[in-house]
Amino acid sequence: MRSLRRLSLTILIVTIGLLFTACSEGGLPTNPSESQPSFSTADQGVTRQQRHDELKALLRAQQERIKQERELTKAGFQQAHAEWKAYRRGWKRAGKKGSSSRPADLLRCEPRPYDADAAIIGPDGGTLHVGEHQLVIPRGALTREELIVAEAPTSSLVDVEFSPEGLTFGRPAELTLSYKGCDVPADIDLVLAYVGWGNRILELPPSQDRRDRSEVVGEVGHFSQYAVAY
């Protein structure tokens, strides 16, 4: 009987030793929390994929809307062109052309047809083209994927509206607005302007007038509407 007990005790000690060795070598988790990261990573991966799929569906919808908008705004383009001609005649009669004493105002040019672009842009950055205008979002400006929409409405302003409204960047994006074809006096310096409701100038971010290319290039830290001003 005593020999049987000693044998049983030996088997028990060996079994415990084997279990301890397996745990220490990673065969079994020594801490319940050690198994959590794998599940967390998987959950995050599913979430990122779901968000990407949702953004792709939204992108297709935006592209279809932009296509329809181009057709709907053709008549508006003709009206904007007529309004521009009337504005230009009044501007010349008033003698305001080339005035350097007036406060900052938005540049007005011959209207262009409606144009737009949309893309899913994430932490790696990306570029949008709206006619001859361009927005370059650098790597690291965004922490996750976003559906970025840029629209140049039909008007006498040189402006682009961006969405989503209120989106901010970790690093400034570079916005280039082209004023090719605009009648701009040589003594006027053009700048980039952040525009609010009613086309009111809210902010003049850092920018440069590249007169040889007929474009203004500036830094954009947030959305939504930007225009060329003087």
Image: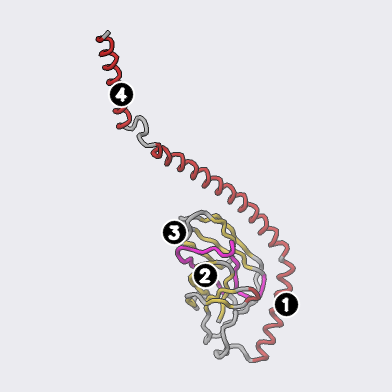
**Residue that numbered label 4 is attached to:** 16
Looking at the rendered structure, the secondary structure element under dot 1 is helix
Examine the rendered structure and indicate whether residue 208 appears above or below residue 24. Answer: below
Among the two numbered marks 3 and 4 on one chain, the one whose residue lies closer to the N terminus: 4
Pick the front one: 36 or 164: 36
Give the side of residue 219 with respect to residue 103, left or right. left
Please give left or right for residue 75 compared with residue 205 in the image. right
| Comes first in the chain, label 2 or label 1 | 1
As shown in the figure, which amino acid type bears the numbered disc 4?
A: Ile
Residue at 60% from the left image edge and 88% from the top image edge: 97
Residues in magenta? 154-179
Name the one closer to the observer, 63 or 201. Answer: 201
Q: Which residue is mark 2?
A: 176
Residue neighbourhood size for the residue with mark 2, other residues' Cα within 10 Å, grouped as few (<14), some (14–19), many (≥20): many
Of helix, strand and loop, which one carries label 2? strand
Please give the residue where the numbered disc 1 appears in the rendered image.
82
Give the amino acid type for the residue marked by disc 3 in the picture.
Gly
